[in-house]
Image: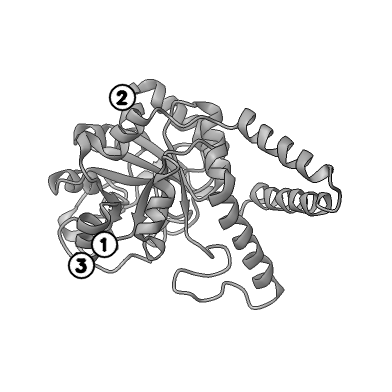
């Protein structure tokens, strides 16, 4: 976890401590609440206009179905081939992961290493774009024989392919807040249509803060899975010592902060939440705040029908044509 995010948690703990201490005095507590609410109102970022957010999230009033990593089950994830397949299968949009090579080139890649998806090994911290470009991103895909000659695309190539396919783009930024916000700002300036066709999302609140700081006209979303810091997706604890309790505490603070005030401070238009925590009440909670819920990752036919017909909720899926298990 980024040191700046941990520092933010400690700052929040200090804020809570001050608030608790102020309760002991009949004057300081209401004064503290007033100052905090005023600061939140004055310094917060405004969300993009509702009509812009709706055009991004529900283009032409349609319930959006977003191809996760471009549709990583139907084609090699985060490739131009995946984007083309998603368009062929009538996806409303694509979710694409942004990473950077050692020489600062923005590319599509989910992991910080190339081991899982390509025929290479090593960290992007140690690989230049020229070296990454020689790798085969289809090497370990179940349909690798159908995608010869595929290359790891740059961010710009992926944007052009997505716009060509008339799809919206969910830019998923894993980290590198300063670097990513600068790269994306450049893309928005070069392709203004992105303002109505894309949204920037991240688990890291710092990414959203820097993106809003770079360009307030960009639609943004926070991504969340409860207990993400202390537990793996399968429920297994990440640590075996006191660190488990420490990160569980951070999880509680993070969850409360996101739902209580961070969403408003960052001016988000959507909240991306792991599918197990979505319900009609949860969707209503965010709807009352003018925020759209997007569920991930919805892969089974019954789930898709439930989200489409009952919840009327936007969802992200690994496959537009088959049932499949989520990738690791």
Percent of width and height locating residue 237: 56, 75
Kindly give the residue lying farthest to the front in the view shown.
26
Q: Earlier in the sequence, mark 2 or mark 1?
A: 1
What is the number of the mark on residue 302? 3
Above-or-below relation of 262 to 230: above
Q: State the residue in front, 181 or 274.
A: 274
Percent of width and height locating residue 19: 77, 50
Percent of width and height locating residue 203: 50, 51
Give the position of the N terminus as an image quadrant: bottom right
Q: Earlier in the sequence, mark 1 or mark 3?
A: 1
Residue depicted at x 43% and y 51% = 285
Q: State the residue in front, 216 or 180.
A: 216
Which residue is denoted by mark 2 in the rendering?
193
Find numbered disc 2 in the image and state the secondary structure of the residue it sits on. helix
Relative side of 303 to 251, left or right: left
Which residue is denoted by mark 1 in the rendering?
141
Relative side of 51 to 25, left or right: left
Above-or-below relation of 85 to 324: above
In contact (CB < 8 Å): disc 2 and disc 1: no
Q: Distance between the Cα atoms at labels 3 and 2? A: 35 Å
Q: Residues within 10 Å of mark 3 (few under 14, many from 20)?
A: few
Residue depicted at x 19% and y 65% = 301
Find numbered disc 3 in the image and state the secondary structure of the residue it sits on. helix
Give the position of the C terminus as an image quadrant: bottom left
Q: State the residue in front, 130 or 147.
A: 147
Residue depicted at x 34% and y 47% = 134
Residue 119 in view here: no
């Amino acid at each position: 976890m980024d040191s700046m995010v941990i520092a933010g948690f400690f700052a929040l703990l200090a804020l809570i401590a001050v608030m608790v201490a102020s309760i002991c005095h009949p004057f300081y507590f209401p004064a503290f609440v007033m100052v905090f609410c005023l600061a939140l109102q004055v310094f917060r970022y405004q969300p993009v206009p509702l009509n812009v957010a709706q055009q991004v999230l529900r283009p032409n009033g349609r319930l959006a179905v977003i191809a996760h990593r471009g549709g990583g089950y139907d084609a090699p994830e985060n490739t131009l081939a995946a984007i083309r397949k998603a368009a062929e299968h009538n996806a409303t949009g694509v979710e694409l992961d942004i990473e950077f090579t050692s020489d600062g080139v923005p590319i599509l890649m989910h992991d910080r290493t190339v081991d899982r998806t390509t025929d290479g090994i090593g960290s992007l911290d140690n690989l230049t774009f020229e070296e990454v470009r020689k790798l085969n991103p289809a090497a370990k895909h179940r349909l690798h024989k159908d995608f010869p000659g595929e290359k790891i695309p740059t961010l710009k190539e992926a944007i052009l392919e997505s716009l060509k396919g008339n799809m919206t783009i969910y830019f998923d930024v894993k980290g590198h807040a300063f670097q990513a916000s600068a790269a994306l700002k450049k893309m928005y300036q070069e392709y203004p249509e992105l303002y109505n066709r894309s949204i920037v999302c991240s688990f890291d609140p710092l990414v959203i803060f820097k993106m809003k700081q770079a360009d307030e006209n960009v639609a943004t979303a926070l991504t969340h899975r409860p207990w993400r810091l202390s537990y793996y997706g399968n429920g297994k604890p990440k640590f075996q010592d006191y660190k488990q309790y420490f990160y569980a505490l951070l999880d509680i603070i993070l969850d409360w902060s996101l739902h209580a005030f961070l969403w408003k401070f960052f001016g988000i238009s959507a909240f991306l939440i792991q599918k197990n925590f979505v319900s009609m009440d949860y969707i209503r909670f965010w709807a009352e705040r003018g925020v759209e819920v997007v569920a991930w990752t919805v892969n089974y036919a019954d789930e898709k029908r439930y989200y489409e017909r009952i919840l009327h909720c936007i969802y992200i899926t690994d496959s537009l044509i088959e049932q499949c298990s989520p990738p690791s």
